[in-house]
Structure formats: C-alpha cells, structure tokens
Image: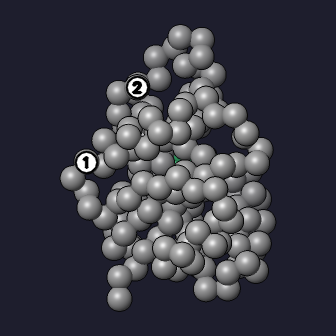
C-alpha cells in the first residue's frame, strides 16, 4: 500500500527549510501532499496563495511524489479524505516543539489513525523563518537565497 503523508502549513512563503522537510519526507513516504492551509493566527496572507501553489510546483518540477493543494478545513479531516495516514512537520527549536506537541495531541483525538512524524531541521536551514522573510521582503531586502524558486 502506498504511504501518503500530508505536510500542512501556511507556507507564506514556502522556504528552503520547508523544501528540505519535503525532500526528506519523500525518503519515508511514497507521496507528500503539501497542504496550504488557512491558519487562524495568520488571517491575511502576504504572498498570494495561488501564486505560492505555482511557485511550490515549480520548485518540485518533475517530482511526481509531490502534490500541492490548498485546503480550508480541519487538517485531520483533510488527511482522512486524501487517505494520508501520516502528518509531516518540521521542528526547529523548543518553541516549535511546544506548539507541535499540542497540535499533534489534538489531531490524534480528531483522527486516531493519523500519525504525526517530526523531522528535525537541517542545521544550516534552522534559522529560515517565513515571518522574517516576509518582513525582509516587505522592506525591499533580497530573500531569494532562502526560497527554492524565484519570487
Ligand atoms: P504553520 O503556520 O502551520 O506553523 P509554517 O508554514 O510556518 O506553518 O510551517 C510549516 C511546518 O514547517 C511547521 O512544522 C514548521 O515547524 C516547519 N518549518 C518551518 N520552517 C522550517 C525550517 N527552516 N526547517 C524545518 N522546518 C521548518
């Protein structure tokens, strides 16, 4: 049976840190669905969601193990509908851990079949953070070294 994982996030923008988690995830799973969700804490996106889908597809051009989807529902339900038994997330630090710990408990409660899998960030990518990238971009700084596509 094919092993599918979803990699949910805001991806505002999708960074080289995210790309690394997907590529490493593909060593564990047959398919990784990058699911761009609506995060209640981040209502207004900075980067247009449809443009981000295209950019991510561009970054994984030719890799048929990757799919990019926008969703607006419970991650646990979205995973079930896509027959994904695994939820992939990246961990950079203890702040990520605290947050991910709570989310994964809730997801387990909502969908008992969904197993969360955490990959520790690659050290050289640990400092890459979408929030900081948005700030730098807003004030005209060059963020291209942190993104796996041309913005
Ligand atoms: P969310 O708003 O759901 O936290 P993000 O787009 O910020 O979504 O992040 C999606 C996932 O990618 C999270 O698990 C986050 O910890 C992880 N992540 C973000 N940046 C990095 C990075 N530089 N290295 C590894 N994982 C990362």
Within the image, what quadrant is residue 111 found in?
A: bottom right
Residue that protrudes farthest toward the left in the picture:
62
* Quadrant the C terminus occupies: top left
Pointer 1 or 2: first along the chain: 1
Residue 151 tag number: 2
Q: What element carries label 2?
A: loop
Horizontal arrangement in the rendering, residue 55 relative to residue 35 (left or right):
left
Residue 60 vs 22, above or below: the answer is: above
**Figure colour scheme:** one colour
Residue 89, image x, y percentages:
57, 61
The residue sitting at 60% across, 46% down in the picture is 10
Horizontal arrangement in the rendering, residue 150 relative to residue 61 (left or right):
right
Query: Which of the two residues, 43 or 130, is positioned nearer the viewer here?
Result: 43
- Residue 93 seen from this side: no
* Numbered label tally: 2
The residue sitting at 21% across, 53% down in the picture is 62
Horizontal arrangement in the rendering, residue 70 relative to residue 33 (left or right):
right
* Quadrant the N terminus occupies: bottom left
Horizontal arrangement in the rendering, residue 108 relative to residue 32 (left or right):
right
Q: Name the residue under label 1.
A: 61
Residue that protrudes farthest toward the top in the picture:
140
Residue 144 vs 35, above or below: the answer is: above
Residue 94 vs 133, above or below: the answer is: below
């Amino acid at each position: 049976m094919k092993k599918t994982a979803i990699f949910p996030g805001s991806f505002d923008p999708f960074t080289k840190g995210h790309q690394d988690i997907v590529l490493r995830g593909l060593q564990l799973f047959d398919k990784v669905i990058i699911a761009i969700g609506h995060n209640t804490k981040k209502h207004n996106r900075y980067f247009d969601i449809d443009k981000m889908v295209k950019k991510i597809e561009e970054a994984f051009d030719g890799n048929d193990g990757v799919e990019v989807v926008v969703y607006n529902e419970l991650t646990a339900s979205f995973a079930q509908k896509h027959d994904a038994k695994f939820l992939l997330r990246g961990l950079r630090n203890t702040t990520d851990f605290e947050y991910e710990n709570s989310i994964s408990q809730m997801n387990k409660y909502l969908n008992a079949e969904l197993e969360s899998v955490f990959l520790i960030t690659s050290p050289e990518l640990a400092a890459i953070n979408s929030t900081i990238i948005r700030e730098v971009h807003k004030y005209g700084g060059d963020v291209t070294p942190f993104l796996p596509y041309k913005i």
